[in-house]
Image: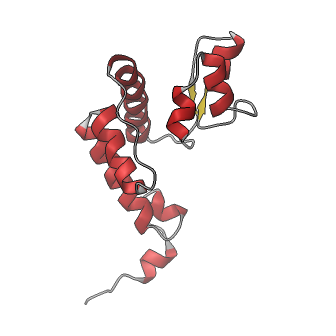
Amino acid sequence: ERHDCLGGCRNIAELANILNPEGRYYKLNLQNLVTGRQPTLEFRQHSATLNYEKISVWVRFCTAFVHNSARLAAPTPLMDGRSVDFQFRALFHYVIKDRAIRNFYVQRRDQVDAACCNSCIDGDASCATRASAITWKF
């Protein structure tokens, strides 16, 4: 159903109204294309970070997403009910097409899934839960 809705759009304004019905504060913001203010789209998904690796991979992901979406044929829509894991793998296989970016996000997903707190997600060794789980051998 979501693919039919997106596929039925006749112009950028219709697409933007489906993806951003109440303004610009969505993961993918197309409002500048509608207003003509700037010929840009905004990827607003990523959290603030100063981590070079996270920034670098995010820029490469967004670039691959736009570049490959423009030059490749659209993949067949996913069947309803596909798992999040399947959708994740399909995104990298059919759209991103970069093994290094995929590997980074697989590792990141596993790190976030295993985390007990934000410190663990960021890889901070000062997590009290993690520190208390260390077994000291003398």
Q: Quadrant of the N terminus?
A: top right
Residue 29 image position (x, y, % from top left): 62, 28
Looking at the picture, does residue 84 appear above or below residue 132? above
Q: How is the image coloured?
A: secondary structure
Depth check: give the residue in front, 87 or 135: 87
Depth check: give the residue in front, 134 or 72: 72
Q: Residue at x 76, y 34 (%)?
A: 22
Q: Residue at x 40, y 28 (%)?
A: 65
Residue 30 seen: no
Residue 97 seen: yes
Looking at the picture, does residue 75 appear above or below residue 128? above
Q: Residue at x 23, y 39 (%)?
A: 99
Q: How many marks?
A: 0
Q: Is residue 8 left or right of residue 75?
A: right
Q: Residue at x 61, y 25 (%)?
A: 15
Residue 38 image position (x, y, % from top left): 64, 11
Residue 83 image position (x, y, % from top left): 41, 57
Would you identify the image quadrant in which residue 18 lies? top right
Looking at the picture, does residue 2 appear above or below residue 128? above
Q: Quadrant of the C terminus?
A: bottom left
Residue 114 image position (x, y, % from top left): 41, 68
Would you identify the image quadrant in which residue 109 lies? bottom left
